[in-house]
Amino acid sequence: MTKAISQLMGMVRYELRMQWRRRGMLVMMIGLLAAILLTCLIEKSVTDKIEYPRIAADMREQVARLQATLALLYTWPVGHTLLILSLPLVAAEAIPQDRHYGVRDLLDSLALDRDIYLAGKVLSVWAAVLIGLVAVAILEGWGGLLIFGPFKLDMYLLQWVIGLIPTGLFAAGMGALLAAGQPNRRRATFVGVAFAAYCVAMLITTSGTVWDSISLARPSLFLYLFKSMLLDSVVHYPPIQIPLALGLGAAQIVLVWLIVWAGLRWKENT
């Protein structure tokens, strides 16, 4: 057990460094931050032209804070869509690139178990995504403070903790696993593109029901927050949607991991 954990941690550290050196993840996160901040600037230019009714002086600060919070929350769909579009492509080459560069043969000579190898790949992708999204969240928070002023920190953190971070982890994990059996990076990228396109189609056809929790696009993660704050009279999601969506997403990752592991094991034995 100690040897397996040591191998897993060593592989995660190595793969995490490689993820950032290949620049794909870094470019994707910079693009995500740029798109979100651009959305904030567009919202600011629109809201500055709106004339609000006069309110009491003691209420102005609360209203301004609420407006700033809502403006930041409106960036959620932008971030969600970019994550399901880009992360499957970035993560898809995580395993096939070892065959492309001949690294897989070297790893086989080290007697690295297939389950350790597969788990290490997925965990390293998740670690890179988590680091990147936390950095984007911090920078967006600073940018939102400069653009809109003070906002409700708890609601801002909520959109990341139950929305964007789980979405990013799911999209990256599925992208890495679905392309695991491909022989080269080109075919792996094609798988990532196909999965991203499928997720966008699922997002467009959102039903607004509990079935959204099963959708690979995970629309319920951001629709529930909109229901709670912005669209209460339009979208009626029960609170169970969030744990259901997160739980089913985790179950889907585990199921695909087992299928991929079995497929790679079968290839080795044939």
Image: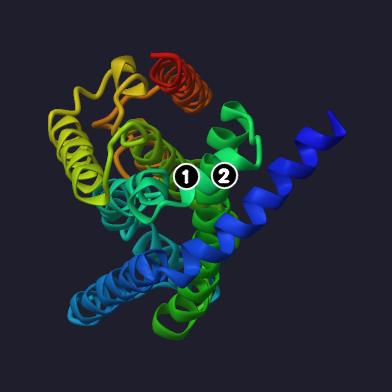
Pointer 2 with pointer 1, Cβ within 8 A: yes
Residue lying furthest bottom: 146
Q: Residue at x 34, y 19 (%)?
A: 214
Asked if residue 46 is positioned above or below residue 85 in the image, the reply reads below
- SS at circle 2: helix
* Picture disc at residue 57: none
* Count of labels in the image: 2
Q: Residue at x 38, y 20 (%)?
A: 267
Q: At which x and y percent is residue 7?
A: 73, 42
Q: Is residue 191 left or right of residue 59?
A: left
Q: Residue at x 52, y 40 (%)?
A: 122
Rounded to the nearest whole Å, what is the CA distance between mark 2 and mark 1? Answer: 5 Å
Q: At which x and y percent is residue 19?
A: 48, 61
Mark 2: amino acid: Leu
Q: Residue at x 65, y 35 (%)?
A: 111
Q: Would you say residue 158 is visible in this rendering?
A: no
Q: Which residue is mark 1?
A: 104
Closer to the camera in the image, 256 or 225 = 256
- SS at circle 1: helix
Q: Which residue is mark 2?
A: 107
